[in-house]
């Protein structure tokens, strides 16, 4: 269900390690299902710093406005600009076209504190999802 090449937070975000000390960040399939139709995203600009487990932005859906928490710390190097015109990509393809940010990791070891895909799926089952 959830790609095994990523790490997951208990707040339902994912981080995909990339070469050069970077990671792509997004929200999980479960998170987008809970949100409903995404209509707007408020994300930091390139150059901004994000900290693990701290708010990095907001996602607005037809149901509510929800905080997005960063699964890792680092500097934003790229924002998925396609989401400005098509925020629904987060619903349609949360693991590929609907990614949010690319960051330069300040501490790659933070990835080790996140959940594997199997552990994340076990968390969802434990929460009754």
Image (tube, grey):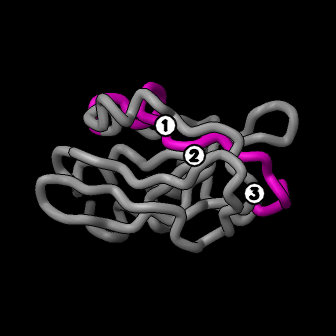
102 or 3: nearer the eye?
102
Q: Secondary structure at mark 1?
A: loop
| Rendered image: mark on residue 74 | 3
| Mark closest to the chain's N terminus, 2 or 3 | 2
| Rendered image: mark on residue 99 | 1
Image quarter (top left, top right, bottom left or bottom right) of the C terminus: bottom left
Report if residue 10 lies within the magenta region: no
CB atoms of marks 2 and 3 within 8 Å: no
CB atoms of marks 3 and 1 within 8 Å: no
Image quarter (top left, top right, bottom left or bottom right) of the N terminus: top left
- Distance from disc 2 to disc 1, alpha carbons, whole Å, reads 6 Å
Q: Which residues are magenta?
A: 91-111
- Distance from disc 2 to disc 3, alpha carbons, whole Å, reads 11 Å
| Mark closest to the chain's N terminus, 3 or 1 | 3
Is the residue 87 above or below the residue 26 in the image? above
Residue 52, position as x, y percentages in the image: 66, 68
16 or 41: nearer the eye?
41
Residue 82, position as x, y percentages in the image: 42, 27
Residue at the location (71% across, 41% down)?
A: 77
| Rendered image: mark on residue 27 | none
19 horizontally vs 46: left or right: right
CB atoms of marks 2 and 1 within 8 Å: yes
Q: Which residue is mark 2?
A: 25
Residue at the location (36% across, 29% down)?
A: 93
Q: Quadrant of residue 53?
A: bottom right
């Amino acid at each position: 269900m959830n790609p095994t090449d990523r790490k997951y937070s208990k707040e339902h975000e994912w981080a995909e390690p990339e070469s050069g000390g970077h990671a792509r960040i997004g929200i999980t399939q479960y998170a987008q299902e809970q949100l409903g139709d995404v209509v707007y995203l408020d994300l930091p600009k390139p150059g901004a710093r994000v900290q693990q487990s701290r708010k990095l932005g907001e996602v607005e859906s037809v149901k509510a406005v929800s905080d997005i928490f960063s699964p890792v710390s680092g500097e934003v190097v790229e924002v998925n600009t396609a989401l400005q015109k098509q925020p629904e990509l987060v619903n349609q393809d949360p693991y590929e076209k609907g990614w949010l940010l690319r960051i330069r990791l300040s501490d790659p070891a933070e990835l080790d504190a996140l959940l594997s895909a199997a552990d994340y799926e076990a968390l969802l089952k434990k929460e009754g999802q």
